[in-house]
Image: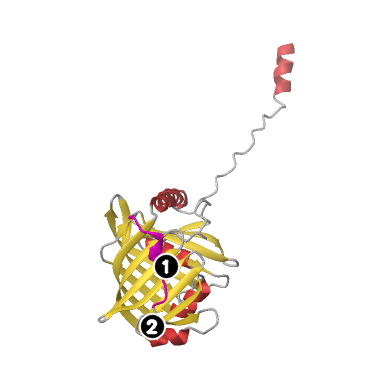
Amino acid sequence: MLLLAMLETSACFVIYTPPVPEAETPTPGWSENKYQVERMVAALVERDRSLACMQTPAVMEYTAGDQHVKAKEELVVKRPGNLRVEAMSPFGVALLLAAQGSDLAIFEPGQNRFMRGEANADTLYRYVRIPMAPADAVGLLMGLAPPAFALGSSAESVSNDGAMMVASYGNAASGTREIGFSGGNLAMVRETAGGGVVNYEVRYSDYHDIGGVMFPYVVDATFPAAGSHVTFRYLRPIVNGIIPDSTFVLIPAPGATVVNLSLVDVRAFSNES
């Protein structure tokens, strides 16, 4: 009878099993795409560390408003912000531009005119309509992600744009930075300001293996806010060669007219070139 009473009493108790929470339904392919992007970003960071400088002959095509220029150039860049551009014409050197540290100089042999100013985005924008500081321009020419791109942080979203996988950082209010990959290589960087205005978009293509480093032979940059577009097609790039610092120093030729870029509107000069 005691055993029966215990059984009857136990029947009054119900064992409570907490419900198993339902797993959230992830965005299709999100985890896999995010993992792939993180791997490619890590490889890009490692590639960036392996590149110190680059020099190459190139064909440059530039458009801004009604101005269109196509020329052969000699490009020399050295990180973090050393830059030298030597533009050729059928008659010889048409223009020399060099930036080192905080100094930028431009020499036009045809007018024997030497211009000097601060190496910043404002100077480059006023002269060639490229709103980038020399350090960012060096990264652009070497196929590097801009320093402002925090590649160590996790992407807010990952999407596909055709064959390109795109990782986005930031938000619509403060602005976004996007980095795209195709075939495991950097294919695009894009910076958009708050409000949706694209500051710049750079596309990289035609990669070649140079001493174990994949390097783009075509760099195509658009600056919508500035209304300019430039394409570089590299001919024989050399990476990590020996480049003396004197390469990025220009000295006025005898009798040259010297102009301070910070005191004048140099767009009038650039339209003459």
- Compared with 113, 82 (above or below) is above
Is 250 in the magenta? yes
Give 24 or 221, whichever is nearer the viewer: 221
Q: Residues within 10 Å of mark 1 (few under 14, many from 20)?
A: some
Task: Confirm whether residue 233 shows in the render.
Answer: yes
Amino acid type, callout 1: Val
Magenta span: 241-253
List x then y, in percent, for residue 226: 48, 78
List x then y, in percent, for residue 236: 26, 63
**Which residue: 45% across, 53% down?**
28
Magenta stretch, overall SS: loop
Q: State left or right for residue 154 relative to residue 88.
A: right
Mark 1 residue element: loop
- Compared with 159, 103 (above or below) is below
Where residue 59 sits, quadrant-wise, is: bottom left
Give 165 or 15, whichever is nearer the viewer: 165
Where residue 144 sits, quadrant-wise, is: bottom left
Q: Quadrant of the C terminus?
A: bottom left
* Residue placed furthest toward the front: 254
Mark 2 residue element: loop
**Residue where numbered disc 2 is placed:** 112
Q: Quadrant of the N terminus?
A: top right
How is the protein colored in the picture?
Answer: secondary structure
